[in-house]
Image: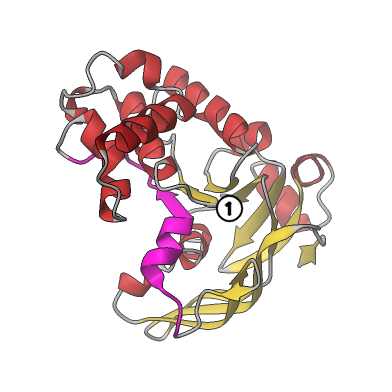
Amino acid sequence: MTITATTASIIQTDSIDVYYDDFKALKNIQLNIKEKSVTALIGPSGCGKSTFLRTLNRMNDLISGFRVEGNIFIKDQNIYDPKMDVVDLRKRVGMVFQRANPFPMSIYDNVAYGPRIHGIKHKLTLDEIVEKSLKAAALWDEVKDRLNTSAMGLSGGQQQRLVIARVLAIQPEIILMDEPASALDPISTSKIEQLILELKEKYTIVIVTHSMQQAARVSDETAFFLNGEVIEFDETNVIFTNPKEQQTEDYITGRFG
């Protein structure tokens, strides 16, 4: 395993092992993820990428038989500490899934949902949050005249950007993205990728992707997962042009995966 140390890390994982009942899904994961950067997780299906991603906001806690050993620190706070407020954690660490999952309500109410849950009721404040979040998600100009119409009427790409706006509305520090463009057409994918590059100015982004081309286009650092282990973690240009591990090279060049 080759790990290159990073500076200014916002996420630090210390010897993470993950089990689902007796199956060991992750083995000794040690990654430091830089603040305000894009980190891509690549590797073949079933290698542990999404499992690792979901450890970062404790989504795996909802799965029967899940158990984690080791520690994950976000800004020096151990997120698996028994005293950790998981609701607060998921506010700080937002999640965008593979398929857009807008709520069956208006565009406005989708974005305002999170702030309302966290106690914001004032209409003008909500209006400001909705507009700011939709602008940040590069969707405002397309929907500003139909905010009160159903989100289900948006295209797939628009729905995914709406979901991103919904995440931004609760002001996270970190955004997790699990194959956010895999169900989208090339034009919508391009818009999502451009959005990722813009968002890293303010947010830390960790993205799982099956597309090595996408990882090369949007990420600063890349971790290559295989059979539940991190084989190599380095700057993206190094991973794709001069990997240190033979397994990484074999995957990058298409010999397996």
* Number of callouts: 1
Report crowding for label 1: few under 14, some 14 to 19, many 20 or more residues within 10 A (C-alpha): many
Q: In this view of the protein, can residue 59 be seen by the observer? A: no
Residue 235: image x %, image y %?
78, 47
Q: Is residue 97 left or right of residue 18?
A: left
Residue at x-position 66% and y-position 49%: 251
Residue 25: image x %, image y %?
49, 73
- Look at the picture and state if 94 lies above or below 198: below
What colouring method underlies this structural image?
A: secondary structure
Q: Nearer the viewer, residue 19 or 93?
A: 93
Q: Nearer the viewer, residue 124 or 70?
A: 124
Amino acid type at image mark 1: Gly
Residue 152: image x %, image y %?
18, 29
- Look at the picture and state if 177 lies above or below 4: above
Residue at x-position 55% and y-position 79%: 17
Magenta span contains residue 92: yes
The quadrant holding residue 247 is bottom right
According to the picture, the residue beneath numbered tag 1 turns out to be 43
Magenta span contains residue 115: no
- Look at the picture and state if 136 lies above or below 50: above
Give the extent of the magenta segment: 83-103
The quadrant holding residue 148 is top left
Q: Is residue 62 left or right of residue 34?
A: left
Residue at x-position 29% and y-position 54%: 119
Residue 87: image x %, image y %?
36, 66
Q: Nearer the viewer, residue 229 or 92?
A: 92
- Look at the picture and state if 53 lies above or below 85: above
Residue at x-position 48% and y-position 68%: 55
Q: Is residue 151 left or right of residue 134?
A: left
Q: Secondary structure at mark 1?
A: loop
